[in-house]
Amino acid sequence: MTSDVPGGRIHMSDPFATPEEEKSPVRRLRGRLASPVTLWTAPGPAGLTVSSMLVADGEPGRVLGLIDSESDLWDAIETSEMFAVAPLGPGERQLADRFAGLMPSPGGLFVEGAWQQTAYGPVRDGLWAGCRLVGSRPCGWALLVEGVIETISTDAAAAPLIHYRGRYRELG
């Protein structure tokens, strides 16, 4: 679908998107499950937006996530065996896009904003968990990364940013 505007045409939808009927059934199922939008960081520094993840309660608590085995984040986690996980809030859509590689980041991913260095990687004020890597294995087209939660900063928790059907959503 396009719209006529002075000087040309503007696409009202993504002209490069895979048509719904051509998507795999697994991808269609995944797209209909709401996922938290989180930022994973590691010493290096490296970072990546991750929405395929969960937290398992227990003694000790654990974090599991699917990340790209060819990402800078995985290289940094594998080297340091440490990483941090922070849920993002509604006002952090551009941050999520920057760390997902969807927005340019002149000067690097960590140039904007206030970051503090920790043993787990750079973090910002707010809720985050510091994790030690305990395992990884191939899982689908990604790498399933498992970490034991060693510390949690619970300074402030905003409403979560959610990813659903290819778009960011907010609760409430």
Image (cartoon, rainbow, N blue to C red):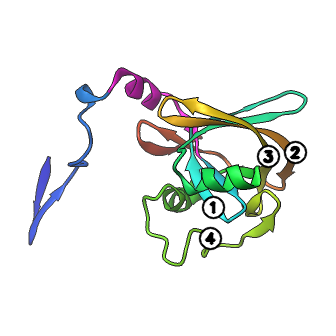
Q: Earlier in the sequence, mark 4 or mark 3?
A: 4
Q: What is the three-letter code of the residue carrying label 3? A: Cys
The disc at residue 46 is 1
Residue at image coords 47%, 34%: 141
In the depicted structure, whether residue 58 falls above or below residue 75? above
Question: Farthest bottom residue?
Answer: 107
Residue at image coords 23%, 47%: 16
Residue at image coords 57%, 32%: 138
Q: What is the three-letter code of the residue carrying label 2? A: Glu
Q: Earlier in the sequence, mark 4 or mark 2?
A: 4
Q: Which residue is mark 4?
A: 110
Question: Farthest front residue?
Answer: 79
Q: Which residue is mark 3?
A: 131
Q: Position of residue 60 (x, y in %)?
A: 88, 32
Q: Position of residue 31 (x, y in %)?
A: 43, 31
Q: Position of residue 171 (x, y in %)?
A: 59, 40
Residue 116 is covered by the magenta coloring: no
Q: Which residue is mark 2?
A: 150
Q: Earlier in the sequence, mark 1 or mark 2?
A: 1
